[in-house]
Amino acid sequence: MASTLVRAALSQPVDHTPVWFMRQAGRSLPEYRELRKDNAMLEACRTPDLVTEITLQPVRRHGVDAAIFFSDIVVPLQAAGVDVVIEPGVGPVIAHPVRTRADLDRLPELEPEALADIAESVTRIVAELGETPLIGFAGAPFTVASYLIEGGPSRNHEKTKAMMLGDPGLFSAILAELGRMSATFIDVQLSAGARAFQLFDSWAGYLSPQDYRASVLPHSQAVFAALGHHEVPSFHFGVQTGELLAPMSEAGSTVMGVDFRVDLADATARVQPGQALQGNLDPAMLFAPWEVLRPRVEQIVRAGLDHPGGHVFNLGHGVLPATDPAVPGLVVEEVHRVSREILAERAAQAPSGEQAPGAAGTDARR
Ligand code: CP3
């Protein structure tokens, strides 16, 4: 039988709510900081020994229901030959930003052979994980385009938006190319054994629904469509996307990631019928006292079980670097405990022969 994470992400019955955390691998873990102290970020991402170990660290420590592949959204660009570095405390910096048709023509193609190390890392991770699924990922075309056009992290994304509105043909050609790269990056991960994938559109929340729908959504749809033949669950997420949940939910993912600024019950009304939800504990809540944090966790578990599709518990964005590394594991235990309890209560209340809302069958309740 498929793993709990895969089943929930396909809105199939489960016996507990599965949980993983965006940015679960990384600076919040002392064992990560120790491994990374002699390696630049992108070098680490291309070294299978390191990728394997770093991906497994949070699974061992927190007992999460899935691993997320340790890499970065700019790895496909780097693999294609783009001059990019990740500066600590800053983010991805691109030596030659793409702002004209000639710049785009110089952008190299990404051949799957350039990702042989990625396939090797995934193969090794999957072998070590056993039953626990690995989630692959890539950046969505708009978010990667923002780095490529701005040349680095941007507060307002003004060069990106100026091109989107002033030269829509060029903007669309760039997003189409980046979408193909992201699909190739994910395809390599799925072919090597990843069981699901997430498309991160981290900066989509900077767009109005009108501009998102006209200039970005078709390119995200193309990525999900290109990967449809793998028939695996897929997640789509962006920060501050409450107002974009409806159009983003049309991109084609089986699960819609929800930012912490939206109540899960409100998200239900905005996504596609039957689509699963992921989220959405505020990452800063992990700094709150347990007596405050615990009921918040329960609240989200309950809201997820009330949603008519599946629910995957996660934060509403990534684990913050200063998070106490003991806390995510407590949240995992609580999500598992509370969801099992609620599902058992609902099953006991359901008249025999009928299923409680959100439950299906006696041994496989959701
Ligand atoms: O655990 C995981 O989630 C898997 C690993 C992962 C990383 N980056 C590792 C990383 C994932 C899924 C990403 C995706 C990513 N990278 C996104 C989308 C997700 C999101 O957070 O919205 C974005 C926007 C990037 C670009 C990027 N890479 C930024 C903004 C930064 C932070 C720069 C800094 O130092 O503050 C990075 C670097 C990065 N990627 C780190 C990690 C663990 C930190 C680098 C380090 O440890 O030195």
Image (spheres, rainbow, N blue to C red):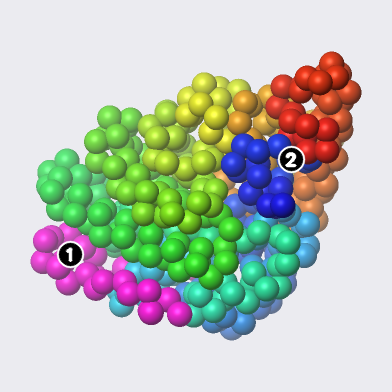
Dot 1: what SS?
helix
Residue for badge 1: 104
Q: Which mark is residue 262?
A: none
User: Residue placed at 74% from the left, 34% from the top?
Assistant: 366
Looking at this view, name the residue that lies furthest to the front: 353
Which of the two discs, 1 and 2, labels the residue nearer the N terminus?
2
Q: Which mark is residue 14?
A: 2
Task: Classify 332 as above or below 321.
Answer: above
Q: Is residue 115 magenta?
A: yes
- Mark 1: which amino acid? Leu
Query: From which residue to which does the magenta span run?
Result: 87-116
Eyeballing the image, is 84 above or below 244? below
Say above or below: 56 vs 13.
below
Crowd band around label 1 with a 10 angstrom C-alpha radius: few (<14), some (14–19), many (20+): some
Q: Amino acid at mark 2?
A: Val
Is residue 91 in view? no
Determine crowd level at label 2: few under 14, some 14-19, many 20+ residues with C-alpha closer than 10 A.
Answer: many
In percent of width and height, residue 251 lies at 39, 40
